[in-house]
Each structure stands twice: as structure tokens, then as C-alpha cells.
Amino acid sequence: MTICLRTSFFARSRRCPFKQFWLPLLLFVALASQPATAQSYSQYATDTSQVFSLVEQMPTLPVGGGNLALVKAVQKQVQLPVEVREGRVEGRVYVRVVIGVSGVGRQAAVAQSLSPACDAAALAAVKRMPRLLPGRYNGQPVATLLTVPVMFLSPHHVFAVGEVARPAQFPGGDAALEQYLQKNKATPAEVKLRDLKGRVSVRFVLKPDGRVGACEILNSLCASCDDEALRLVRGFPRWQPALGYDDQPVAMYHVLNVWFSPPPPPAGTAPPVAENQVYAQVEQMPVLPGRSGPTAVQSAVQELIQYPEHTASGEGQLSFVVEPDGRVTRPNMRKSISGAMDEAVMAAALRLPRFEPGRHNGQPVAVLLLVPVVIDIR
């Protein structure tokens, strides 16, 4: 009795042809490392007419390099059809081919189609791949079935990091990139004003020549933080470009996280109270010394505003925390007036004198205050 296994050499995905390209490579490694057992194949003399899809040693290039080298060898033989070069068609063709005991491919056929022109180009590329070292079972060469992915991408395609043979790299590596950010990053005033902590995520294109192309913000922290992160990215030196599976430079998307945090408080100053320990209402609310009435804080803020050069009328809402020692921290515009005006209002809040702190159960606590702001320019 003979047994013929027909499992695929590569995992296939019809819906997402690019994003998980590395998964088939890992699958191949996992499958190739599994030994053939008596339970799977039983005992019989080696039969080279039998076609296997999983053996102890899968077919490889004579020069070695594993599965990645084999994919590259096929990809270098691809001649892009006009429809791909013009960007009208992109995707992947899967070609099933039998590698005989001599290492020569035969019976190549399309297992998953993209278009007639791409199918023909994929078959031609697989047929032109060099002679391989055949697969081996029980130490003997056997015919082996492979399913090979062949990619068709336009010259203007921008690759994801998982689609390239070698990702782009900052000159000097990750350590040099971190040094660049630390040396050149400026902390915006808004980070200090609002006690902001967090990251700005920037996605940008690294061109085939290593220069930075289009940029976009994926995760925003504040407007001035976003601007600073974009400034850093646009000022990058040329990177070592990414390489495609034909070993040629390609454009690649890269995502960078730029982290911001306020400077530490002066020596002897208590750090701000954690957000989950800030009260909205307490038995005794914070008050400004020498001022009373429901509009006392609003009037004090308005008196301290240093108006920007170009100011328009508007209404906003300011929030800030009065710490247990009476300091004002974390000003924020809950309702914006304008960019420049918002900065001026938050800066005014930080110039307020120390409050008599709020108290809960007789103890000073941090309290969040909401203050309306009216700008009337006549």
C-alpha cells in the first residue's frame, strides 16, 4: 500500500495577498522540521514515482539559503506584465510544481490565479528556476510537491515591513535612531502646561533611495506634539533602503513612536496626584485667597491672560487640577477657542496664585475645577 500526502508547501490566503507573506515562510520551516514517521508512510521500498509534499529534507538550492533563497530565486525570474507595471493589477499567484528526483521541476500548474497575464508570467518564472537539490525521505531522493507564491507588484508599490526580504534601517541601527531622537527632540510647551505623557505614532514612506516620503499621524497626542514628531521624521538622514525579494531597493512603510513627557518637578516639589485620586466635588472646594464669589476663579484667569497678536472672540472651557499643596497643574481646554488663545488661557491658569486646597474628610486633596472663559474683542 502506498500513501501520498497532498498538503501545501506554503499556506495560502486569498483575501490578503501581501500582509502575511512571512507566515508561509514560517510554515515551511515548521513543516520541514517534522520527521516522517512509520505511522504516516508505513514500511515500503523507496518509490521515486511517488510524489511527497512533506519529507525529512525539502528541496533546496544547491547554494543553500533555505526557503527564502528559493523564493528569491523564483522572484528574480519574474517578468512583470504591462498591467502590473501600470499599477492596474497587484497580487500573488500560487504555482504548484513537482521537483523530481533529479531536482528539475515538472508539471507546473497554477493553484491560485491572479490574471491570465500574471498566471503565465508566474509559470514561466517557476519553469526558469535553477535545478534544486531534491527532497529526501529515508536518505533517498524523492519527488516532492511544492506550492510556490509568486508576487506581482507595481514599481510604485509601497511595501509593508512583512513584505520585504530586508526592512529599511536607520544608519547605525536602532541605537543610533534612539540617539537621534533624544538629541533632536524638543518638548513642546503644551506638554509642560498640560502634564501630558504619551506617544505620537507617525507612519511614513521610506523611498528606494532611503529618503523620507509622505508622512501621516496615526496616533495623536497634541497638536504641537504632532508637529514636533513630523519635524523629527522629515529631518531624518537617508536610511538603508528596504530590499524586495528580488534583492532590489523598494519603498517601504515604517511606523515610528515618538514619546513625550513633562520635565520632572523642581526638587522638593511633590509630583502631581494620580488621575484616579483627583476629586470633582469635595466638602470644601479650593478657593483663591482674598477672592470670593462664584466667578472669582474665572475673573482671576481672565486678568492673567496675555492675549496673542491675532485674537478672535469666543467662548471656551478651561479645566485644571488644584493639588493638595494648592498648586495648579494640568490645565486643559475642554472647549477650544483657538490654538493660540487656548495656549494663552492655559498659561494664565499656571500663573494663578496658590489656592487654599480642597478638603475631604478634613484632609487636603486634589480637586478638578472647570472654569468658563469668555473672550470678547471689540
Image (cartoon, rainbow, N blue to C red):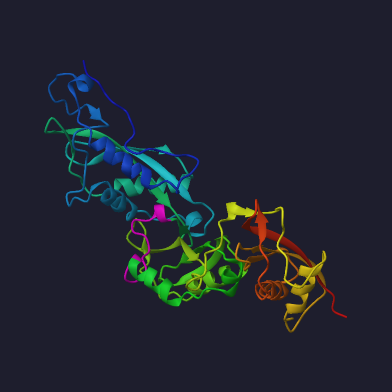
Please tell me in which quadrant of the rendered image residue 312 appears. bottom right
Residue 89 appears at what percent x and percent y?
Answer: 51, 51
Q: Is residue 38 above or below residue 207?
A: above
Answer left or right for 226 relative to 183: right
Q: Is residue 266 above or below residue 274?
A: below
Magenta-tinted stretch: 161-174
Depth check: 50 or 180 in front? 180
Residue that extends furthest to the bottom in the rendered view of this protein: 309
Residue 167 appears at what percent x and percent y?
Answer: 37, 60
Residue 99: tell me if it is visible. no
Q: Is residue 171 magenta?
A: yes
Depth check: 61 or 287 in front? 287
Depth check: 350 or 256 in front? 350
Answer left or right for 295 relative to 201: right
Q: Is residue 39 magenta?
A: no
Please tell me in which quadrant of the rendered image residue 12 appears. top left
- Which quarter of the figure is the N terminus placed in? top left
Residue at (28, 26) in percent of width and height: 5
Answer left or right for 295 relative to 169: right
Residue that extends furthest to the top in the rendered view of this protein: 1
Residue 213: tell me if it is visible. yes
